[in-house]
Image (tube, coloured by chain):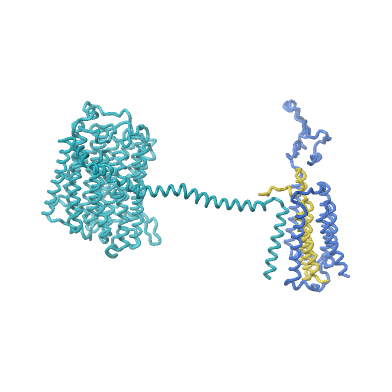
Chain colours: A yellow, B blue, C cyan
Amino acid sequence: MSLDWYLVVSAMIFCIGAAGVITRRNPLVVLLCLELMLNAGNLALITFSRMWGNGDGQVFAIIVMVVAACEVTVGLGVIVAMYRRRLAIDVDDLRELHG
Amino acid sequence: MSEFFFFLTAILAIGGAIGVITLRNPFFNVLALVCHLIALAGLFLLLRAEFVAFAQVIVYAGAVMVLYVFVVAYVGGQDEPLHAWDGPGQKGIAALFGGLLFVELCIAILGTGLKAVSGHGAPYEAGFGSPDQIGELLLTRFLFAFEAASVLLLIAAVGAVVLARRRGGIHEGEQRLSFTDFIRPIGTGTMHEGVQGTTGTPAHEPGRDESAPSKPERVGIGAAPDEGVRP
Amino acid sequence: MTDFAWLVLAAPLAGMIIIALGFKVWPGRLAGWIGTLAIFASFVLAVITFLKLQDADEHHKQVASTLFDYANTVGVDAKLTILVDPLSVMMILVVTGVSTLIHLYSVTYMNRDEGISRYFAYLNFFVFSMLLLVLAGNFFILIIGWAFVGAASYLLISFWYRRKTATKAGIKAFVINVVGDIGLTLGTFFIFKHTGTLDFLGTFSQAGDIGTNNGDLVAGCVLLLVGAFAKSAQVPFHTWLADAMEGPTPVSSLIHAATMVTAGVYLIARMWPLYEVTPAAANVGAIVGCATLIIAATIALAQTDIKRVIAYSTMSQIGYMIMAVSSGAYAAGMFHFMTHAFFKALLFMGAGSVIGAMAGVQDMNKMGGFRKVLPFTFITMLAGALALSGIPPFSGFFSKDEILADVAQRGGFHWILFVIGYIGAFITAVYTFRMMFRVFAGKRVAEAEELAHGHLAHAEVHRNPTDGEVEDTDVGFPGPEHYIAERAIPMKIAMGILAILATIAGALQIPTVTDAIHKFLTPTFEGSKYYESLNPSNSFTFTFMAVGAVLGLLGILLAWQIWVRRPGTSARIQARFQPVYTFLWNKWYFDELLDALFVKPIAWMGRFANQTFERLVINDAIVGGTTMLVRAGSAAVRAAQSGLMRSYAAVLVLGVGGVALYFLLQS
């Protein structure tokens, strides 16, 4: 099984995640889509690690997982705080940035 | 054999991913992601990355997803109402973007100078991807990254607590308790208190929670979170 | 010696600072006395400097002293340098001396003015600036002093700032003087281009090597002349001087008669090495001076405002001086500068006294018969008027005749100047005594009657003498009181001393008898082509001295015929030569000419720039256009700033895709 298939799968997952970030409006689901994108990256890293036969890519992947976990924690905290403040749980309603 | 497993896991992973972005109910989105993560762990195994695969299953599919499930349960998965600008066209654009990006990445992977990609990679050595190899790397070459990750985790944990805690002054009638509330007597018996009718800790104050008189009033620490009805 | 010269500069500066900072502390009169004392100290120091200079040996009579280097880089040597030599010492002697007397006069004259402290601070500042100008040892300090006296002149002309006419006159003077400043500065550039130094002595030592009538140098010298003309009120930059009579009378006396307006004369005398190698520029100076002396003299014939008559007379006399120093008669020009300072300051003081007696009225038509009631004023003014008319043995006679004789020695077209000079002298005598007779002779007017009965006339309503506008006596206006010399000791002292000086100063340089000024100034003009050679023969000198005296007496006689013997003659002459009279009354239409040539076009340009160009091009096109562009652009971009995070993410994906594509195409 040639390794570039893994990369193709990784690319596909990444694109699906990106499309999800663009389409979904629930911040929870947006976070999930971000996870998808990160995991696609992880898959590519593991593939490269396999390719070179050293563990660097795997360590990188683990660090990415840690960062993803942190991001999820904070993101979910934000969502809970929004809910507490009776804000709509909808990224389209959070439009303080609009010009 | 490995091809079969590869396709199985790849299809599962992609299917899970598609499920994440298409299903309407956030709860099912989370479940689809769990499915996707487990399939991904399978792919990792195929790539001889045992430790990462199991870390993936335990940390990601286990812990993080449980956190998600909790939040989904707490916040509640509402269906997303359709906005005017949120028709099929927008989804089409998103699909187009994703598609274009994918095509581009594929060209990048298959049609360019990543010559080392074609083939089966380096020969397998015993111990590759095992926990001891990863551990050694983490504690020698990547020690700084390891420590930084630990600090990052700490910050994230504290940040999540700070973000999600109940703030004083947001809701009327909410009181912030301080340490002195625990050691202060109920009342000091001053004339002022008698006139005011205030005796004791702020939790005893009359007129509290007039907005929700039907709620049973609990006193002191650990009062229930005062969650208003969501609009 | 130079230490004392520095102190000469420091005294008025200190006086100014003390008065200016303490104006709330001391009463106005004290400020006056402080100012007078400062200038007197300056005068004493100037005398000491003069004595030290006399003691110095023959070859060290030009001493430059540098306090510190202000900027000494890229070939520019701007130092704080003063040059002490006979010329500058003569200038500071006259400036400080006359200034002391005028300060003394002002102590009384401005006594009841609310702004007296301000007045004396300005006056001291003016004296400081003037001393800086004449002591300057390089072009840099000269320009600073030049600009400072312009500023002081502006401040003092506009002193009664509640009078619109005064503020307008101040602005006019300032603007014309700034034109002169520009000329001076540009001229300095042209000269610096060739000599590479700002220092006077360095410049002069190189002047001979450049060659006759070098184009740059001629341009530079003509530009210096522009500065001199603007400061000295020569045609066509003279229109400010008559308007400058809006200032208090002592100011007219000090600035617009005795000192500042002679700065141009000083400048040309100081730059003699440059003018001797650029005869073209020197001839321009001589011709313009000659034109001014005759034009101003004719205008003075028709004016009725007493101060304006004296102002035009000043212009005319400075025309003589400019003509002299431009023709190489340096000693004669400086001599005339000195005598003129005495008698012209005196005439203005006398005019101030008369105006006081008239309770602020300056129109000669309303005056008459003051001879008996203002005896002191009459006597002193008579001395001044005789000196101005060039009647022997008064000082003006000697200095003016020496100028004309020296000019005649130059030959060539200078003969024309010489003849015009004598015509001017005759007209001078006429208009001077026209003024004297109209003020002092004839029937007593009401004010004179009142004074004869022992009390000074007081105006019921104070009016601006120029446009008759009713005015206040509050600050920014003249005070409620007027003073006459007969009743004020300081005024008497000042006028008395000046009258004596105007009478006897001619003794310094009587042909074949004394030669003091010429000898004294010799070190400054060492190496001059003309200084020693312009020495008219005795027969020539005495012939034309006699001619001058006769012309002066004839002028006086004519004036007496017209305004005393047969009153009404002047009205008949007016009627007969109506166009000429109108022409003179309107001052040769110079104001209108300058208006048409410069003011109106520039005002039109300003209006165009303001109302059309600025509105359309600047506001609408450039400012409005850029803002419109930014607005349109921001409106376009704002659509992208929807605040929708998802669209941001989409754009991000696009961008990443684009970057990736770029690298793809690169590889």
As drawn, the residue found furthest toward the left would be C539
Q: Residue at x 38, y 38 (%)?
A: C22
Percent coordinates x, y for residue C368 in the rendering: 21, 33
Q: Is residue B213 above or below residue A35?
A: above
Q: Nearer the viewer, residue C72 or C208?
A: C208
**Horizontal side, residue C30 vs residue C321: left or right:** right
Give x and y (percent) for residue C55.
Answer: 22, 53
Q: Position of residue B159 (x, y in %)?
A: 74, 50
Q: Would residue C21 be seen by someone viewing this image from the given angle? A: yes
Image side of residue B129 versus residue C340, left or right = right
Percent position of residue C27, x then y: 35, 34
Q: Residue furthest right?
A: B1
Quadrant where the image shows the C terminus of chain C: bottom right
How many dots with numbers? 0
In terms of image quadrants, where is residue C522? bottom left
Q: Is residue C462 above or below residue C195?
A: above
Q: Is residue C519 visible?
A: no
Which quarter of the figure has residue B225?
Answer: top right
Along the viewing direction, whichever of C530 and C84 lies nearer the viewer: C530
* Residue B144 vs residue C447, the one in the foreground: C447
